[in-house]
Image (spheres, helix red, strand yellow):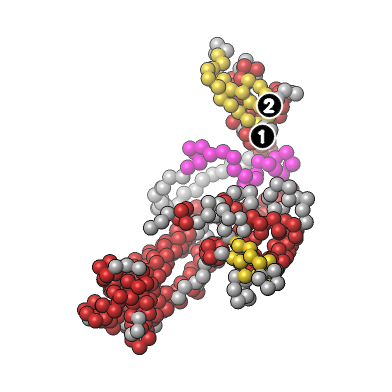
Amino acid sequence: MANLFDVIPSSFFNYLASSSNNRVYADCLMKIYEAYDREVSYRIPRERIRDVLAAYIMDNRVDVPEAGMASLTPAEQANLIIRNFTQNDVGWLEEDSDDATFERHIVMTERGILLAEFLQNLAQPEKEEFSGYIYAIYNTLRSKEQWKDNPYVDGLRSVYRNARQLSRSLKRLSTFIKKIIERMVKEETLESLTENLLEYCEGSFVREYARLTRQQNIHLYRDYIRKALDLFQSSGELFEQLTKGCMAEEMLDAEAAAGRVADMIASTRQFLTEDYDAIMREIKHKINVYLQIAVGRARFLRNREADTRGFVEQTLKLLLEDAEADMKDNLPEDMRAMFLFDTNEFMDLGSLRYPQRAQTIRESTEQDYIEATEEDIAAAREEQLREAVNPYNKHLMQAYLERQMGQRASLTAEEFPLESERDLLCVLSAVAYGPENGFEVEAEEGYVDTGHLILRRFTIKRSQ
């Protein structure tokens, strides 16, 4: 088999490879491909293709990423795109002239058509009727009058291709179910889980799977299919016809053609009688896993609302809903930032929650409480304010760096003050927040030693 890049032009994928222009050129190729939809062939006057591309450029205000194209009109840009696509080392389009009118036409090459179909299928995959392959195989083998003149082309090869396509489709289907399961595991609310379940139950997959297992169940046709394939192998006259047909179509000698026919019969029979069941068992297993995960997830989400953590979550939710109004009415402005529950900046070991055994309350107890005085409340407030202040936060460290740098573009570690531990903490925090504050940090070899403090050498500068 020849290597792909020995067959296609050298720059066939270039216009889709560059991140600066791949979207534009992919859209242009698809617009050209769509222009042929209502035509009897892939051959259109050049002016029509140019107008299609010019309209796309104007409607989407596209900046075609080519040197010197910014000053060109949309029609001129469209002409340049056509010339790019018709280059010999690209080969998406070809240009020829009508012998009678001398009008120039654009012809979409076979490789260009295949590429456009491939891109279209990637963007919007077509839904397959898996059960249709089984019925097509059964009908082909049953309609002997249709393939008796050429049993290889109209009979065996058609059956073989349908079986291979069904195999590939079912394997893709099995893979898609795995993706559904992975998505289900990530669901975090009962509402979203319910929506996902409804989408699954009402989706095209369930309907198609039902057709595979009921209306078009392979067990209804398998016995006939197996007997027909056995006849291909056991009937000397029919096998000879198949071999001759394979020799003519595939350009093989008699021995190679006979081996090819035998392999096609054996692999088709193997898939339809054994491999098919294995794939369907795998699909059924994944469906069961999917439903078990969904049910377990639903139970977890439902039960979680009843435990202590659920009460905390509901409390926080209520606080968040009413926090803005409550803070305006009950807190001074300088303390409101302390109660922004949805802002998280730090995590420590104390934030981790470990599994605990639920404690059973065996007897009730009474506890006296002491009512806080105004002095106690004021002292607690001052303590909270002191603990809430972070002298090394991102914004303060940005201002600290700006003061230290002044008009300079960069600073080295030796140029920072290092007289106390507070100075060291300021430098470390400033460096840690540097990239977020618009600075670049480059570590260097060696250390700055002040006698009681040691700091790794570095250079910090403003980002370009």
Q: Give percent across and percent down for residue 413.
A: 61, 20
Residue occupied by mark 1: 437
Residue 201 vs 424, above or below: the answer is: below
Residue 324 vs 232, above or below: the answer is: above
Quarter holding the C terminus is: top right
Q: Work out whether mark 1 precedes mark 2 in sequence or the reverse, and give the earlier one.
A: 2
Residue 31 lies in the magenta-colored region: no
User: Which residue is at the front of the view, 212 or 193?
Assistant: 212
Q: Quadrant of residue 276?
A: bottom left
Q: Give percent across and percent down for residue 159.
A: 35, 76
* Residue at 42%, 65% in the rendered image: 172
Q: Quadrant of residue 391?
A: top right
Q: Quadrant of residue 29?
A: bottom right
* Residue at 41%, 47% in the rendered image: 355
Residue 397 vs 223, above or below: the answer is: above
Q: Is residue 28 visible?
A: yes
* Residue at 63%, 76% in the rendered image: 38
* Residue at 58%, 26% in the rendered image: 442
Q: Give percent across and percent down for residue 154.
A: 38, 79
Kindly give the residue lying farthest to the bottom in the view shown.
145
Crowd tier of the residue under label 2, counting other residues whose Cα lies within 10 Å: few below 14, some 14–19, many 20 or above: many
Residue 414 vs 138, above or below: the answer is: above
